[in-house]
Amino acid sequence: MDKKKYYITTAIAYTSGKPHIGNTYEAVLADSIARFKRQQGYDVFFQTGTDEHGQKIELKAEEAGVSCKEFVDQVSGEIKNIWDLMGTSYDKFIRTTDDYHEKQVQKIFKKLYEQGDIYKGYYEGLYCTPCESFFTESQLVDGKCPDCGRPVTPAKEEAYFFRMSKYAPKLIEYINEHPEFIQPVSRKNEMMNNFLLPGLQDLCVSRTSFKWGISVDFDPKHVVYVWLDALTNYITGIGYDCDGNSTEQFEKYWPADLHLIGKDIIRFHTIYWPIFLMALGLPLPKQVFGHPWLLQGDGKMSKSKGNVLYADQLVDFFGVDAVRYFVLHEMPFENDGVITWELMVERLNSELANTLGNLVNRTISMSNKYFGGVVKSTGVTEPVDDELKAVVQGTKGKVEAKMEDLRVADAITEIFTLFKRCNKYIDETMPWVLAKDEEKKDRLAEVLYNLVEGICVGATLLESFMPGTTEKILAQLNAPKRTYEELDSFGLYPSGNKVTEKPEILFARLDVKEVMEKVEAMRAQEAKEQEPEEAEAPVVDIEAKPEVTFEDFMKMQFQVGEIIACEEVKKSKKLLCSQVKIGSQVKQIVSGIKSNYKPEDMVGKKVMVLVNLKPAKLAGVLSEGMILCAEGLDGELALMTPDKDMPAGAEIC
């Protein structure tokens, strides 16, 4: 019997920079759903990847001094590394710079043009570069982009347009007939009331103001608008061919069962994308889920705010599964979630170290202490056992129901309810008291067997969310992996099995003060690394003059002079004439410094003067000495002045 297929995708990550934990959350969320579906027996195909074209990337690459391809290669690689670090079990990592994708985008564009859905026109509107989107004045919020809140700029250019209005009635009908298509329901209402029902404008689908994109092959000065390029990855990645030669993989997996995306791009996935698919004659995805944002304690993460958290940093502090647990469990179904360092520590200590870690450690330790690690069912039961068994056997169904509605946080809560019930069972049965009575040894063995069995079921259900932790727990319990069908049974742990002698601490408790001190040190180091390096002081090499003797030098008389008056030399563009007080004398000195100093700026300055220079006429004006200056690389002049206040006439020696 063939397995039922399940095709899940994330939005492809934009390669403008390193993804923060809010971006990473989506990949982890999709992974948890994909893993759970596999556990249920589905034939799962999980696709993710990177979106690599557009004006923003062109600008970023230019700033970095590299080619666009070099820039996206580096960032895409970094994104893939973070997805791998977080244990995402994707089957395909697509890049929109992949040759096969680019060729299909060109084919799709041409097909839509030839069938009249795309036409050439002229665009004038307000453009948001980060979102790569045009808006009308009425769509702006407080004069800024309605999606990201950044400033927009007027843009005017020749462009190709897609006739959105042609398909709008059909899409409205589809959404009304398929209430599950857009989730949560609040997102559906937003799309219908704000965009579809008021009437769709035709969509700009090409640009000419930048070059980094997929060219329109029949009109090469145009590049394909990023959303027509990016959205089609969901079909090109599994083998769609616009000429009708799609692969078996495409025929098998399309339509997608779930597009998992951030709420900020819901419009593109529930309006533009379905209309593109209708124009191509393809079925629509079964569901689009616009998840909320994961916010820092002081709002949406942004580099400008300095509040960005990255997955690799968090993993260094807490470990992969602790980070996975937090982002999955702390994110509500519809509302934005909050992440802070302090909250991470609190959850790790209370839920992971205490509720789960301590439970596993105590159970294994008691099994070793009282029975040499052997776990055996004796059949000596009491009514309290039935309550524990009911929770253990009922958890699978509750988790399944929550996952069916994509309520991942609630599904995890159900599993931890099982673990909490196991902890309560320890308090109720008090194994340490039973151990004191030899006649209750069989009852003690049954209690520990029930605990091990309950932990095995809970740990196996936890695998979709914290796979590394599940592996560790089952290894310590020496427990064989169970099938999904076995998870609502009780008593499958092999009686007589032996647990590990030395239980591993799954999650060590952390001191919030120590963590915050390390965080501050990390931030200080980051700030230091981001400071621009001090440029090496410039030097000037000049052609060497012939050597002079000390006697020659001693013939020159240098003194401090105070400029008491200064004026321009009228016959010259370069010369200033200064009256310089030197001791009790006043000398007139002509200097070629007019390009750097105004006459009024000279008055009052104390300068270095070569006093006994033979008088000469410059531009017809007598000069009785020389004011010394330094000359920089670009010819700029600077007067040589004493760094302390010295009297006029002081000898320079």
Image (tube, rainbow, N blue to C red):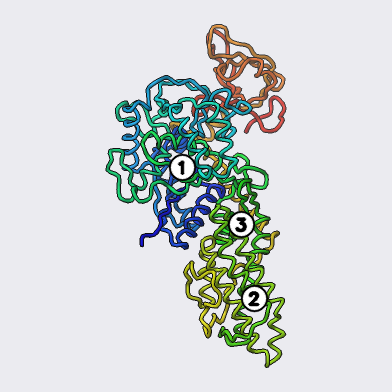
Amino acid carrying mark 3 in the image: Asp
Does the image show residue 541? no
- Vertically, is 222 above or below 470? above
Find out whether the residues at labels 1 and 3 contact each other: C-beta distance under 8 Å: no
Amino acid carrying mark 1 in the image: Thr
Residue 286, position as x, y percentages in the image? 46, 46
Of labels 1 and 3, earlier in sequence is 1
Find out whether the residues at labels 2 and 3 contact each other: C-beta distance under 8 Å: no
- Which residue is denoted by mark 2 in the rendering? 386
Residue 646, position as x, y percentages in the image? 71, 29
Mark 2 residue element: helix
Q: Nearer the viewer, mark 2 or mark 3?
A: 2
Label 1 Cα neighbours within 10 Å, binned few <14 / some 14-19 / many ≥20: many
In the image, which disc is placed on residue 3? none
- Which residue is denoted by mark 1 in the rendering? 15
Q: Quadrant of residue 391?
A: bottom right
Amino acid carrying mark 2 in the image: Asp
- Vertically, is 467 above or below 592? below
Q: Residue at x 34, y 41 (%)?
A: 101
| Nearer to us in this view, 485 or 136 | 485
Mark 3 residue element: helix
Q: Quadrant of residue 100?
A: top left
Of labels 2 and 1, earlier in sequence is 1
> What's the CA distance linking mark 2 and mark 1?
54 Å
| Nearer to us in this view, 342 or 175 | 175
- Which residue is denoted by mark 3 in the rendering? 410
